[in-house]
Structure formats: structure tokens, C-alpha cells
């Protein structure tokens, strides 16, 4: 049996055939390449998670539990034992949780080679009293070194950034990897909108599944709430809750991260990891899900070439489309404020690290 082609890699089984590129395991391959289709379906996806701390290990957990593919969990050499130990512990859940996935811990980027999705969680988390922006100097250095390695070993991967401050880290990853913008995306909106939906469901006493909502803008305090685009099984939320009650849920979602930092002394990880793996799933299964993510916008929303939180279609090519929605005057003003904070953050990055400009 010939070696299996990696997703995204040009593949030729027979020198007489034209090379083709497989980006998705769901790709349709015609005619005499039918055998290749069968081979490509047989290959498991590969997800690498960089940083085996709270968020990273929990990403590995959700990814394995959802049987998204084989998982590589990488940390620095000093923490290689932790990465290996967590990976082995997680692998041992397979028989009970009924997933088949290789889960491998490592400090060697060679083990991540050919990943389809790489989730970057490496970096310091917040401690009580810190803002996300306080992490910038240290985490830019970490994310820069990580994403250079990712680009070298998995040039066709889609990179999901999680490290904070998120908008600055997405920019750093883009500059240091040299990846096309659609291969880079940041996780913040999935978490923020999940918190918002969760708090609305608590207030209404209904299932979280019935709340459909949308947010724009940056992470946490910078989010742009959109009650106009929030519904409960199709019913506009404004028909079920007062403005004050909706604002209460929005405000709690905005500071939801800080509330958890105060309680635990470190930042949240179950829900951030869940949001990251929701994005990984959309990419690996080519689901074309519409999710709020930090994506590159140029003319969209008048952003002018920055990564900001917007609804986008996530599929096997990464960010396949940014969706623009109508904003009223208040929403537009909040979005502009959020965009200007992203610009300030990127300005700080380029001042501290001029080679990233
Ligand atoms: N975007 C979000 O929604 C969101 C939510 C929560 C946390 N975060 C951020 O995610 C990051 C991780 O948080 P955490 O709680 O998992 O922290 P953590 O301290 O538990 O884990 C971070 C891990 O990164 C590793 N690391 C550091 N430098 C590295 C390098 N160069 N290469 C590989 N690994 C390296 C550390 O050894 C550690 O194991 C933080 O920056 C945090 O602020 C983001």
C-alpha cells in the first residue's frame, strides 16, 4: 500500500497522473483517482496543541473525546514530562470514553509535522489584578517562537490562536508564520458568545441550545453585544427579557473571564478549550460553521488590515468568508472602539518588536 498523502499535500500515486492537492478528507476526487479518495478518507486528522497547561490539556481532552483525530500535546523541554504524562493519562480514557485516537505528549516539533490544525495555547495566563494586555511582552516572544516552528513543520495547517492578549497574538502569529490570512484565526468570540448564551439561558430558565446569538469585536470588555441579533428559538430576546436583564447578561459575559480569575487565581480553561475545539471541529469536518472568530478584515467592517472578532465561515480552508452584517449607530460606535483597541495593541507589539511591523 502506498504512503498516505497528508491533507493539504500534493499527492501522486501514479507518475502518469496529474498531481492533486488534498485539503479536506471530504474532498471529491474523480475517475481513476478513486482509490486515492478511499485512502484519504482512511487517514485520521492530526491536531497539535501547543502548551500543555490548563487550556492546552483541556483542548486535547475535548478533541480526543470528540474523536476529531490524533492529538499531539507539546510543551517546552522542561515540561516535556507533563505533556507526556497528560497525553498518556488522556489516552487511557479511550476505552471508557470510546474514542480511538493516538494522544502523544512531546517537546519536539517534529512530532507535530503535517498537522491539519494547530491550537496555540502557549503563554502566561492572567493572575488576579492583571488585564489580558499585561501579558503582551512575554507572550509575544512565546507565540513568535511557537508559530515559527508551526510554520516550519505544518505549513498547510490552520492555526487557532488562544494565547492572550488574543488580538495581538493573532497578529504576531500572522507576521511570524508568514501564513496566508485565512490560515490564521483567533479564539475569543466562541467563548464570549457561549458565556452570553449561558447567562441568558440561566435568566430565562430555558435550554442553552435554544439561544442563538452573535457578538463582534474583541475579547471580554471589548466585545460588541448584539441583542438585536439574539433570539430564543427564533423569538427575539427583547420579547422575553427587559433591556436591563439583557444588559446584565451582556455585562456578566464581558467580565466572565475576570470573575473566574478572581475565584480560581488563574484564567478559565474548560470553556476556552471548548471554544477552540469547536473551531477545530468546524475546520477538520469542513462544516462551514458560522462562528465569531478573530479573522483578518480589510475592507470588511472598514477595519483596514487587522484581525478582529467577526462572524466567519470556518471550513477546511480555514476562514473561508467573513460575514458582514448591518450595524446601527450604537453598534457601529462600539465596533469602532473595539477596532481601535486592536490597533493600539498591535501598535504596542510593533513598538516593542519592530521586526514584527
Ligand atoms: N482566548 C481565550 O479565550 C483564552 C481563555 C483562557 C486563557 N487564554 C490564554 O491562554 C494561555 C494559556 O492559558 P493556560 O491557563 O493554559 O496557562 P498555563 O500556564 O496553564 O499553560 C501555559 C502553558 O504554555 C507553556 N509554554 C510556555 N512557553 C511555551 C513555549 N515557548 N512553547 C510551548 N509551550 C510553552 C507553559 O509551559 C504552560 O504549560 C494564556 O495566555 C491565557 O491568557 C485565552
Image (cartoon, rainbow, N blue to C red):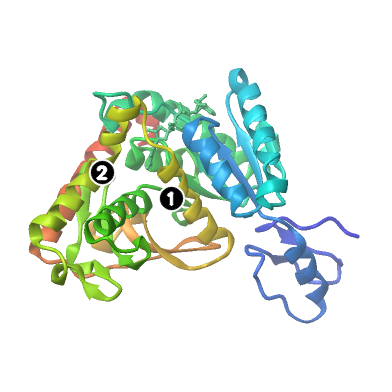
Q: Residue furthest bottom?
A: 31
Q: Residues within 10 Å of mark 1 (few under 14, many from 20)?
A: many
Q: Residues within 10 Å of mark 2 (few under 14, many from 20)?
A: many
Instruction: Give the left or right position of residue 127, taking residue 317 as reference.
Output: left
Q: Compared to 322, does 262 lie above or below?
A: above
x, y (%) of residue 64?
62, 48
x, y (%) of residue 109?
65, 34
* Residue 305 seen: no
Q: Residue furthest right?
A: 1
What residue sits 63% from the left and 62% below the top?
23
x, y (%) of residue 233?
30, 73
Disc ID at residue 275: 1
Q: Residue furthest top?
A: 78
Return the residue nearer the eye: 193 or 187. 193
> N-terminal of the two: label 2 or label 1?
2
Q: Compared to 107, does 62 lie above or below?
A: below
Label 1 lies in ligand 1 vicinity (Cβ under 8 Å): yes
* Residue 149 seen: yes
Q: Which quarter of the figure has residue 297?
A: bottom left
Quadrant containing the N terminus is: bottom right
What residue sits 58% from the left and 24% below the top?
76
x, y (%) of residue 342?
25, 43
Instruction: Give the left or right position of residue 50, taking residue 300 as reference.
Output: right
The residue carrying mark 2 is 220
Return the residue nearer the eye: 184 or 225. 225
Amino acid at each position: 500500500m502506498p504512503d498516505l498523502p497528508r491533507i493539504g499535500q500534493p499527492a501522486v500515486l501514479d507518475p502518469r497522473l496529474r498531481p492533486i492537492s488534498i485539503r479536506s478528507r471530504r474532498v471529491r476526487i474523480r475517475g481513476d483517482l478513486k482509490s486515492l479518495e478511499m485512502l484519504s478518507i482512511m487517514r485520521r486528522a492530526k491536531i497539535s496543541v501547543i502548551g500543555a497547561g490548563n487550556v492546552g490539556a483541556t483542548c486535547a481532552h475535548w478533541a480526543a473525546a470528540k474523536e476529531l483525530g490524533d492529538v499531539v500535546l507539546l510543551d517546552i523541554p522542561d515540561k516535556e514530562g507533563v505533556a507526556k504524562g497528560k497525553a498518556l493519562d488522556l489516552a487511557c480514557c479511550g476505552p471508557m470514553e470510546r474514542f480511538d485516537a493516538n494522544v502523544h505528549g512531546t517537546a519536539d516539533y517534529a512530532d507535530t509535522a503535517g498537522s491539519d490544525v494547530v491550537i496555540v495555547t502557549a503563554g502566561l495566563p492572567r493572575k488576579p489584578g492583571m488585564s489580558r494586555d499585561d501579558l503582551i511582552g512575554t507572550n509575544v516572544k512565546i507565540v513568535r517562537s511557537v508559530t515559527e516552528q508551526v510554520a516550519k513543520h505544518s505549513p498547510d495547517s490552520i492555526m487557532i490562536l488562544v494565547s492572550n492578549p488574543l488580538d495581538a497574538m493573532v497578529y504576531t502569529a500572522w507576521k511570524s508564520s508568514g501564513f496566508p490570512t485565512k490560515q490564521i484565526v483567533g479564539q475569543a468570540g466562541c467563548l464570549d458568545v457561549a458565556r452570553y448564551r449561558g447567562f441568558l439561558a440561566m435568566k430565562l430558565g430555558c435550554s442553552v441550545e435554544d439561544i442563538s446569538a452573535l457578538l463582534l469585536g474583541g475579547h471580554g470588555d471589548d466585545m460588541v453585544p448584539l441583542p438585536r441579533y439574539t433570539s430564543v428559538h427564533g423569538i427575539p430576546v427583547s420579547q422575553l427579557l427587559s433591556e436591563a436583564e439583557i444588559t446584565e447578561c451582556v455585562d456578566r459575559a464581558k467580565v466572565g473571564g475576570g470573575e473566574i480569575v478572581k475565584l480560581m487565581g488563574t484564567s478559565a480553561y474548560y470553556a476556552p478549550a471548548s471554544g477552540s475545539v469547536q473551531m477545530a471541529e468546524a475546520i477538520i469536518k469542513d462544516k462551514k460553521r458560522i462562528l465569531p472568530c478573530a479573522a483578518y478584515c480589510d475592507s470588511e467592517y472598514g477595519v483596514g488590515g487587522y484581525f478582529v472578532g467577526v462572524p466567519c465561515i470556518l471550513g477546511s480552508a480555514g476562514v473561508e468568508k467573513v460575514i458582514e452584517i448591518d450595524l446601527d449607530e450604537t453598534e457601529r460606535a462600539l465596533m469602532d472602539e473595539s477596532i481601535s483597541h486592536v490597533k493600539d495593541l498591535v501598535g504596542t507589539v510593533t513598538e516593542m518588536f519592530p521586526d514584527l511591523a
